[in-house]
Image: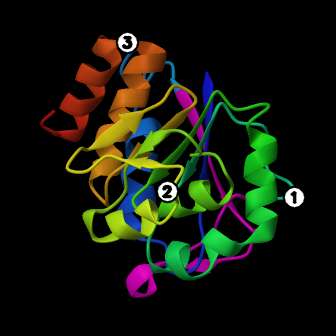
Amino acid sequence: MKKIGIYLFDEVEVLDFAGPYEVFSVAYKDRFEDKLFEVTTISETGDMISARNGLQVMPDTSLDQAPNTDVVIIPGGQGAREKEAYNEKLIKWLRACQDSAEVIASVCTGALVLANAGLLDGKRATTHWGSYDRLAAFSSVDVQRNVKFVDEGSIVTSGGISAGINMAFHLMEKFEGKEAVTQTARWMEYDL
């Protein structure tokens, strides 16, 4: 069973984390028999966060207590642009995750966090269309526009908000194959 860690913070865009959370949480080998993924939500302190538009979310754990995961997902939103991209504790944690995680991924402006951590140096990456120029300010990043996601092996970035769902299905196919994607998308009534 692959382990997915999704980082949460104040002013995180709801669908940026909830979309991938749903994709990975409802994926089973046999309907309701064998879960394919274990999803853990993580915040800096483990305390409740206030997502965009006031949604209160209680994470499972803190950065200090977070388990090793196969995939780390950094969502975006106003909080990513204004605070988390400069959060030294988060950046240090992400750099450490490079040694244990198979994939570090971002949704939307979560790419700015990865860029500040140096994880996008020399790589192609994408973000929300409204932040292409912000990402392009990192001269070492090759910004890809008008795509849902970019896969650079151990680093995967996606466009904004709902594009994180497409990225999550892409990662599912990478780990579990097309049939898992087909079954999960059907269950979610999501058109691929």
User: Residue placed farthest to the bottom in the image?
Assistant: 54
Q: Gap in Å between the C-alphas at discs 2 and 3?
A: 26 Å
Place of residue 126 in the rendered image (x, y in percent of width and height, measured from the top left) = 37, 50
Look at the image and tell me in which quarter the N terminus lies.
Answer: top right
Q: Amino acid at mark 3?
A: Gly
Magenta span covers which residues? 37-61
Q: Is residue 164 visible?
A: yes
Q: Gap in Å between the C-alphas at discs 3 and 1?
A: 33 Å
As helix, strand or loop, the secondary structure at mark 3 comes to: loop
User: Residue placed farthest to the left in the image?
Assistant: 191
Q: Dot 2, how many residues are within 10 Å of its Cα: few (below 14), some (14-19), or many (20+)? A: many
As helix, strand or loop, the secondary structure at mark 1 comes to: loop
Q: Dot 3, how many residues are within 10 Å of its Cα: few (below 14), some (14-19), or many (20+)? A: few
- Residue under label 3: 177
108 within the magenta span: no
Q: Amino acid at mark 1?
A: Asp
- Residue under label 2: 111
Q: Quadrant of residue 4?
A: top right
Q: Pick the residue in front: 25 or 171.
A: 171
- Residue under label 1: 64
Q: Pick the residue in front: 168 or 1.
A: 168
